[in-house]
Image (cartoon, helix red, strand yellow):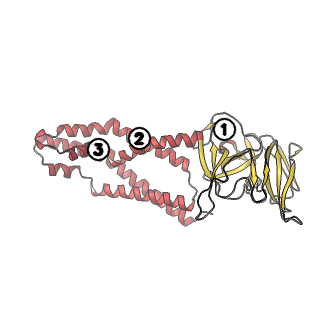
C-alpha cells in the first residue's frame, strides 16, 4: 500500500517543480530577451564599461532561486519515487519531458540565438571584450542548455521504451515459480502492435496475444501500476474452474504433478500445466480456492482473462475482471538479471527466455514445451 504521506510529499515536490520551472521559463523566454534588447540599446547610445556589461548580464536573484527550487524539488521527487517504489505514470512524465526539452531548445534556435548574436555585434571593438565575456553573451540560458542536453537522450529513451522494449522488475510472488521477486525482465513492446504510449490505444496491429503469453499491462483498477500475469482467456473464451480443474471452451487444461511438499498430506503442489500447447509451472495450495470452488466466465470481445502462476496468491482477473485491450503494455520475453531483496549483488543465474524453459529451484525440475 502506498504511504499517503509519501505521496503527498512527492505531489508537493512536483508542484514546487512546476511553479518554479514556469517562472524560470518566463524569465528565459520573455524577460531575458527584453533585458538583452535594453542592453543592446544602451551600448548603442553611449560608452559602457566591462563591469557594467557583466552586471547587466547577471541573472536576477529570484531567477537563481527558481532554478535551484526547480532542480532540488525534482531531484527529491525522483529519489522518493525510486527508493520507495511509489506508483507514478512514468510514460506521461517521459512524454512531457521530451516535448518540453525539445520546445525549449527549438525556441532558442529559432528566436533567442539571434538576440545574443545581435548583442555581441553591438559591443564596440574599443571595449576589447575578453573571451570569457564573449562566451557568456553567446551561451545558452541554463534552461535551454538542459533541453539541448536531454532532448536527444529523451527521444532515444522514449522511442525504445514506447515502441521496442522496456525493462521491468518483479515486485511480488504472484507469478512464482516462473518469475521470482527480484527478477529483471525485458518486455517486447511491439509484439502486439504499436500503441499510443499514453492511452494504450492501438495504432498498428502486428500480432495478437496468445493463450499462455506472459503479459505486462496497466492494472485496470489503477492504470498507474503495471501488473504481470499470464494470458489464460482470449476474447470469446468460455472458462470454467471446478475444484482445481481449469476448462477452456470445454477442454480440460491438463496438469501433471511435479512436486508436492510434504510428500504425505501436502499443503502445496507444483504442476506442469499444458495451457493450449504452452507448458508452464503453476503453484497451488492444496484445498485453498481463493476465488471459490467453482466459477465460470465468458471473456467479452476486446478483453482478456489473466491469471498468475502462483494460483492461490495472485490478484488477477478472478477479482478485478477482464483486461481491456488498451491496457496492454507488452509481452514479457526475457529474464536478464536477478537481485534478491536487500543488500545483495545482482546475479545472472536466472537468465532465460520466457515461454521456452522453466526451472523449478531446489527440486531441479525442468519442463520444456
Q: Residue at x 48, y 59 (%)?
A: 77
Q: CA distance from mark 1 to mark 2?
A: 32 Å
Whether label 1 touches label 2, CB < 8 Å: no
The answer to whether residue 354 is left or right of residue 243 is: left
Q: Earlier in the sequence, mark 2 or mark 3?
A: 2
Can you tell which of label 1 and label 2 is closer to the viewer?
1
Q: CA distance from mark 1 to mark 3?
A: 45 Å
The residue tagged with tag 3: helix, strand or loop? loop
Of 310 and 270, nearer the camera is 270
* Mark seen at residue 344: none
Q: Position of residue 13 (x, y in %)?
A: 46, 60
* Mark seen at residue 103: 2
Residue 122 falls in which quadrant of the image? top left
The answer to whether residue 93 is left or right of residue 277 is: left
Q: Position of residue 345 (x, y in %)?
A: 58, 60
Can you tell which of label 2 and label 3 is closer to the viewer?
3
* Mark seen at residue 139: 3
Which residue, given by chain and number where applicable, does mark 1 sit on? 191
Q: Earlier in the sequence, mark 1 or mark 2?
A: 2
Amino acid at each position: 500500500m502506498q504511504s499517503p504521506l509519501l505521496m503527498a510529499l512527492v505531489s508537493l515536490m512536483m508542484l514546487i517543480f512546476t511553479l518554479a520551472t514556469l517562472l524560470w521559463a518566463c524569465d528565459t523566454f520573455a524577460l531575458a530577451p527584453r533585458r538583452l534588447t535594453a542592453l543592446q540599446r544602451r551600448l548603442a547610445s553611449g560608452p559602457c564599461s566591462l563591469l557594467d556589461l557583466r552586471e547587466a548580464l547577471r541573472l536576477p536573484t529570484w531567477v537563481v532561486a527558481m532554478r535551484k527550487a526547480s532542480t532540488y524539488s525534482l531531484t527529491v521527487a525522483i529519489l522518493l519515487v525510486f527508493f520507495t517504489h511509489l506508483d507514478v505514470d512514468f510514460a506521461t512524465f517521459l512524454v512531457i519531458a521530451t516535448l518540453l526539452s525539445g520546445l525549449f531548445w527549438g525556441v532558442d534556435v529559432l528566436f533567442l540565438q539571434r538576440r545574443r548574436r545581435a548583442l555581441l555585434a553591438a559591443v564596440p571593438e574599443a571595449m576589447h571584450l575578453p573571451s570569457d565575456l564573449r562566451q557568456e553573451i553567446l551561451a545558452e540560458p541554463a534552461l535551454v542548455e538542459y533541453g539541448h542536453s536531454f532532448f536527444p537522450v529523451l527521444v532515444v529513451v522514449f522511442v525504445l521504451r514506447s515502441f521496442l522494449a522496456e525493462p521491468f522488475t518483479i515486485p511480488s510472488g504472484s507469478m512464482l515459480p516462473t518469475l521470482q521477486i527480484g527478477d529483471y525482465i525485458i518486455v517486447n513492446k511491439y509484439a502486439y502492435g504499436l500503441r499510443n504510449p499514453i492511452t494504450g490505444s492501438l495504432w498498428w496491429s502486428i500480432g495478437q496475444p496468445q493463450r499462455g503469453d506472459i503479459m505486462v499491462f496497466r492494472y485496470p483498477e489503477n492504470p498507474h501500476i503495471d501488473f504481470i500475469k499470464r494470458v489464460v482467456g482470449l476474447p470469446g473464451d468460455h472458462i470454467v474452474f471446478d475444484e482445481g480443474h481449469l476448462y477452456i471452451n470445454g477442454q480440460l487444461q491438463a496438469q501433471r504433478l511435479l512436486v508436492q511438499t510434504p510428500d504425505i498430506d501436502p499443503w502445496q503442489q507444483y504442476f506442469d500445466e499444458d495451457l493450449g500447447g504452452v507448458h508452464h509451472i503453476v503453484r497451488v495450495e492444496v484445498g485453498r480456492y481463493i476465488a471459490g470452488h467453482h466459477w465460470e466466465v465468458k471473456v467479452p470481445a476486446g478483453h482478456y482473462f489473466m491469471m498468475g502462476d502462483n494460483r492461490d496468491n495472485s490478484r488477477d482477473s478472478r477479482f478485478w475482471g477482464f483486461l481491456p485491450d488498451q491496457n496492454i503494455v507488452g509481452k514479457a520475453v526475457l529474464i536478464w538479471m536477478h537481485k534478491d531483496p536487500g543488500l545483495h549483488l545482482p546475479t545472472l543465474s536466472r537468465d532465460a527466455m520466457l515461454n521456452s524453459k522453466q526451472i523449478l529451484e531446489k527440486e531441479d525440475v525442468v519442463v520444456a514445451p
